[in-house]
Image (cartoon, rainbow, N blue to C red):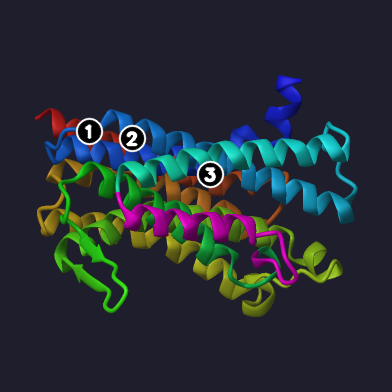
Amino acid sequence: MVLKLLNYTEIKTKITSIFAFLLTAAYIFYAGKPINWRLTLIFFISMFVFDLTTTAINNYIDSKTNHQNLGFKRGTALLIIYVLFGISAGAGLYLAYLTDVVVLLLGAVCFLCGVFYTFGPVPISRMPLGEIFSGVFYGVLIPLILLYVNMPQGTYLTLKPGWETISLNINVMPVVTILLLAVAPACTTANIMLANNICDVDKDIAVMRYTLPYYLGRKPALYLFAALYYIPYAAVVLLVCLKVISPICLITLLTLVIVQKNIKEFFKLQDKEKTFICSIKNYIIIMASLTLTIFISGLF
């Protein structure tokens, strides 16, 4: 039963949410700020369980056309989705209750993106927007919410809703810091989906699924694939120059040699079974090295 559930929710693919979480936690540690373990744990439960939920929804919807074996009867598979959604939504609402309306709104955006990725009359997964939404969802919103609930109130933004006026104050440089920190998880997550769509472009067209590689063409999509790995390294350099992270983090640049090797391998052959793994390897290499160097910086 447990193994079937883990396969249904594709537990092995959850590195994208976990690494984005760990990277942000490492930065909080480096910044010398105390971690609010209660809020952090509640957020992790909501984030992780909702990640499982979106995958289950995706597999449930796709199984209607690809006849995938879900491991459960369709009624049971649907019930699992409802239970997972209830747990994640409950934890998210409790987190918003303990914090403020900003967390509620950000959480609502996450839930809407996750649900309508494969659900609805025009799912995001069938449009050339999947890479953008996955990059923003995992790479930007996870760090933003985790930092928001752990940093002193007003560090990034302040929202004061009212019946007559709504006041929003944004502290530009702290928000820019988040965006630069989010470049690595956003780009590497988007590239996992881009690699998947490049490998499946012919199959997707057959089922009227027109993803980004369909509109760009295979060769431009491959160039974009490479560029999305170079951008995080540029962001690391900029973060060090702005003194947001320690120069120790420049060690991450050494991993470009391995990443480039995987890029070349994927350029030679785009195959789901043989070379798609290159995008997973590059994700782990970049995210693990950056997370580790930020954490080590915090020790010194």
Q: Quadrant of the N terminus?
A: top right
Q: Are marks 1 and 2 in contact (CB under 8 Å)?
A: yes
Q: Are marks 1 and 3 in contact (CB under 8 Å)?
A: no
- Nearer the camera: disc 2 or disc 3: 3
Q: Position of residue 106 (x, y in %)?
A: 40, 57
Mark 3 lies on residue: 89
- Which label lies toward us, 1 or 3? 3
Closest to the observer, 270 or 167: 167
**Residue at label 1?**
35
Q: Residue at x 90, y 48 (%)?
A: 67
- Whether residue 290 is visible, yes or no, is no
Classify 10 Å Cα crowding around label 2: few (below 14), some (14-19), many (20 and above): some
Q: CA distance from mark 1 to mark 2?
A: 7 Å
The answer to whether residue 245 of the structure is visible from this angle is yes
Say how many tags the image has: 3
The reply to whether the magenta stretch includes residue 111 is yes
204, above or below 5, in the image = below
Assign a secondary structure to mark 2.
helix
Badge 3: how crowded within 10 Å, few (<14), some, or many (20+)? many
Q: Amino acid at mark 1?
A: Ile
Q: Which residues are magenta?
A: 100-124
User: Looking at the rendering, in which quadrant would you find the C terminus?
Assistant: top left
> Left or right: where does residue 147 sit relative to residue 213?
left
Distance (Cα) linking label 1 and label 3: 23 Å
Question: Mark 2 sits on what residue?
Answer: 40
Badge 1, how many Cα within 10 Å: few under 14, some, many 20+?
some
